Amino acid sequence: MDNQDQKVERMTLLVFASDLDKVLGAFIIATGAAAMDIKVNMFFAFWGLNALRKEECKIPRKDILSKMFGWMMPKGANKLKLSQMNMMGMGTSMMKGVMKKKNVMSLPDLISTAQDLGVEFTACEMSMNVMGFKKEELLDGVKLAGVATALDSASESKTSLFIS
Amino acid sequence: MDNQDQKVERMTLLVFASDLDKVLGAFIIATGAAAMDIKVNMFFAFWGLNALRKEECKIPRKDILSKMFGWMMPKGANKLKLSQMNMMGMGTSMMKGVMKKKNVMSLPDLISTAQDLGVEFTACEMSMNVMGFKKEELLDGVKLAGVATALDSASESKTSLFIS
Amino acid sequence: MDNQDQKVERMTLLVFASDLDKVLGAFIIATGAAAMDIKVNMFFAFWGLNALRKEECKIPRKDILSKMFGWMMPKGANKLKLSQMNMMGMGTSMMKGVMKKKNVMSLPDLISTAQDLGVEFTACEMSMNVMGFKKEELLDGVKLAGVATALDSASESKTSLFIS
């Protein structure tokens, strides 16, 4: 497909949030676009990295601050909370229940589907560095890159969205 | 105008938030663009649907969860709150007062103006389904469609913005 | 550069938020793009204006509401707080400390760098009016303009992002 590069429509999603609702929105757009043969690049920065964390992954950390960030932030797609009406987790559980009942894919399933459809995941190196995350803590297949890579992708994309 | 479709500039706004400030921002952009002869499509998903709800509309609901969503979320443009400095409603009232005093259109007026200027409103079907909203609960003239329609619109647009 | 206008790639950033993390994101994108010879226009509206306020600037204000907005909102880039994990300022201080330690530029430094790289800052006139801000309260070099100017810039840009 890449040797016909001029003809492939591209989309870049800059995922900055880790609220369940916003990350769901990002992945519904990503999988929808990929199903329409749009080549989607998702860049995860800052809080957005949390959506890519493996649930179980203990890494010997170098400093106390990295440990604190690691403890305090949601560990993976299953742990994200709604940006509103979380109500100490009740609203989030309710939303997940409704989604299941109405046959809407869960976030972890959407993430797998996106990967199966060839959506590329890139984690922002600077954010990884600031939050003290290691590559091994993120889902397999996630690349690391800097802001220039995200901007190149945006330059080649018909649509770029900042999801915060 | 649509038979000259190639020449019409298009804009797609994906409205995901229901905070008064952000929805105001979306409609100021939408009406401004429409006044400049840009064809604007607004897609409302998730919390964004609240801005389109009619203030008075009782629908016999099927399940308790849909009822709960209906009760707990703001019923229409008049009920939205600021994302910051709401201060139990005081900040929001203050903001509305200042806007009136300084002759800035209120959100309900901006919404009517957008409709008069031909801005199209589409509600995300999946979000409607999850939140248990019915078409009759939304402002007249709102269409329902899926994510593919939003993505098609974005593909044809010079500018697409995600407002969350 | 402007007489070759057709060849210059442009980017428009609509900065609506005043959370430290989001404004940092906006300026990392802006300076990154400017370093890649993209002409960047940043429009600051609503809360976003706070990032441009001078730290020390007393203006005789006309009305009590403008005074209140002035008091209650963060006075400049140094006073912005994280959108999450602020923890009464502790999380924000921690984040600033980590950034310094890991040699990531602070927000005030990123703002200066953006200005040095020719990034244009424009403040939304309507927001200035609603919040009762005066031009003198904002950083030197900030222009004032209405939504039409922001939309014109977006129309000419390869990439436009709404940062909320």
Image (cartoon, coloured by chain):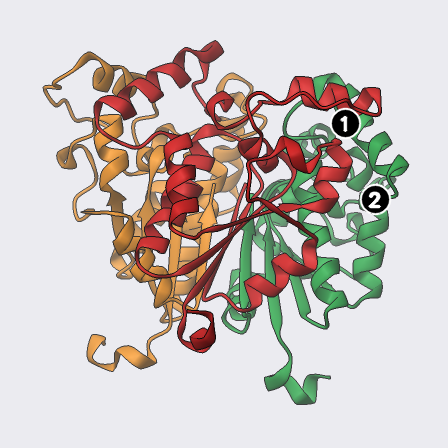
Chain colours: A red, B orange, C green
Mark 2 is on which residue type? Answer: Val
Disc 2: host chain? C
Please provide percent x and percent y for residue A5: 46, 74
The dot on residue C104 is: 2
Quadrant of the rendered image containing residue B23: top left
- Tell me, yes or no, if residue B104 can be seen here: no
Mark 1 is on which residue type? Answer: Thr
Q: Of circles 1 and 2, which is in front?
A: 2
Q: Nearer the viewer, residue B154 or A80?
A: A80
- Which quadrant of the rendered structure holds the N terminus of chain A? bottom left
Q: Secondary structure at mark 2?
A: loop
* Crowd band around label 2 with a 10 angstrom C-alpha radius: few (<14), some (14–19), many (20+): some
Q: Which residue is mark 1?
A: C92
Residue found 65% across the figure and 64% down from its top: C41
Q: Nearer the viewer, residue B147 or B139?
A: B147
- Which quadrant of the rendered structure holds the C terminus of chain A? top right
Please provide percent x and percent y for residue A137: 64, 31
Q: Secondary structure at mark 1?
A: helix
Quadrant of the rendered image containing residue B120: bottom left
Please provide percent x and percent y for residue A42: 52, 50
* Crowd band around label 1 with a 10 angstrom C-alpha radius: few (<14), some (14–19), many (20+): many
The reply to whether the C-beta atoms of the residues labelled 1 and 2 are less than 8 Å apart is no
Disc 1: host chain? C
Residue found 26% across the figure and 61% down from its top: B118
Please provide percent x and percent y for residue B99: 50, 41
Quadrant of the rendered image containing residue A47: top right
Q: Earlier in the sequence, mark 1 or mark 2?
A: 1
Residue found 29% across the figure and 58% down from its top: B119
